[in-house]
């Protein structure tokens, strides 16, 4: 029964995560409720996200919504940011990490009301004085803490005036990059419970394909309200974890 539940959790979490980020709000607590050890639950998330995020990126690439030439530089920036975040995480307390996470998400939420980006722009994504530091900083956040990485990246791409469907593809590529290293680490430490992880992964791949197809048809005017709802949900969850 747990395998079937995890399959549907993967579909729901990754569909939501593809559209607005924050899929971990659904999958990680659900796995903990099912009794999975916390490290195995995180490992399952990282392994399934690696595969599902690449599948959604590849779908958009195949549909010519994005080009690898325009986006390949995201991979090293996200990887280096993730490694930097992991190093910083080893040097600061968990309480400080919670404060950083809540602060960044609240800042992104407030900035979304002030920013002019509508997720309907037509600007190309290229390395610049705004995109590289922004992606690197979010990579640090992902390595440092994690939840909300995709949501923060969508805010960044909105600010850079990138069209929503292309932004989804770039976020999925960055997620693949940051999760790959983490997945390898968890696999090497034998933290992965493979039968449960595969069930989640199959659901996640299905959810990723559903998500990119919905994203292709989603009116860009609806994106920011969805992002704001996910941001509030992330802040509430992180705050609740810190208090409890």
Image: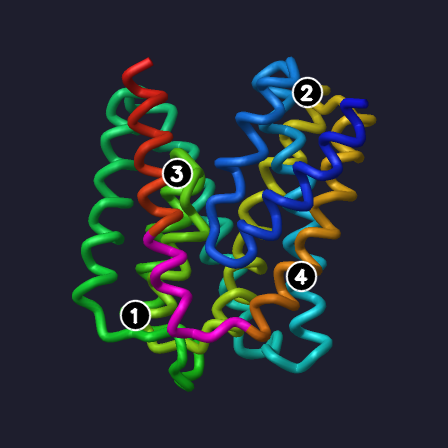
Label 4, on which residue? 56
Query: Does the magenta portion include 190?
Result: no
Lower sequence index among marks 2 and 4: 4
Query: Does the magenta portion include 224?
Result: yes
Lower sequence index among marks 3 and 1: 3
Label 2, on which residue? 191
Lower sequence index among marks 1 and 2: 1
Label 3, on which residue? 85
Disc 3 + disc 4, Cβ < 8 Å: no
Q: Is the residue marked by circle 4 packed among few (<14), some (14-19), or many (20+) residues within 10 Å?
A: many
Relative horizontal placement of residue 170, taking residue 40 as reference (left or right)? left
Residue 31 position within the rendered picture, expressed as x and y whole percent measured from the top left: 62, 24
Residue 200 position within the rendered picture, expressed as x and y whole percent measured from the top left: 72, 36
- Label 4's element? helix
Disc 2 + disc 3, Cβ < 8 Å: no
Task: Choose between 99 and 184: the one closer to the eye.
Answer: 99
Lower sequence index among marks 1 and 4: 4
From the viewer's perspective, is the residue at label 2 or at label 4 nearer? 4
Relative horizontal placement of residue 102, taking residue 234 as reference (left or right)? left
- For the N terminus, the image quarter is top right
Residue lying furthest bottom: 122
Lower sequence index among marks 3 and 4: 4
Region of the chain picked out in magenta, as a range: 218-228
């Amino acid at each position: 029964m747990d395998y079937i539940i995890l399959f549907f959790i993967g579909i729901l979490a990754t569909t939501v995560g593809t559209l607005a980020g924050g899929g971990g709000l659904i999958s990680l607590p659900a796995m903990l409720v099912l009794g999975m050890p916390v490290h195995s639950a995180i490992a399952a998330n990282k392994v399934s996200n690696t595969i599902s995020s690449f599948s959604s990126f590849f779908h958009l690439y195949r549909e010519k919504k994005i080009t690898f030439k325009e986006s390949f530089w995201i991979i090293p920036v996200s990887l280096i940011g993730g490694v930097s975040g992991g190093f910083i995480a080893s040097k600061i307390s968990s309480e400080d990490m919670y404060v950083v996470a809540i602060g960044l998400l609240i800042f992104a939420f407030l900035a979304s009301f002030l920013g002019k980006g509508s997720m309907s722009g037509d600007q190309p994504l290229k390395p610049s004085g705004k995109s590289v530091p922004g992606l690197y900083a979010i990579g640090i956040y992902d390595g440092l803490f994690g939840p909300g990485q995709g949501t923060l990246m969508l805010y960044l791409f909105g600010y850079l005036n990138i069209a929503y469907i292309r932004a989804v593809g770039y976020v999925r590529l960055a997620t693949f990059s940051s999760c790959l290293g983490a997945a390898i680490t968890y696999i090497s430490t034998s933290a992965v419970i493979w039968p449960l992880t595969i069930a989640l992964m199959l659901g996640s791949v299905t959810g990723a394909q559903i998500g990119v197809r919905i994203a292709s048809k989603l009116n860009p005017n609806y994106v920011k309200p969805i992002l704001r709802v996910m941001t509030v949900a992330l802040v509430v969850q992180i705050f609740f974890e810190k208090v409890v």
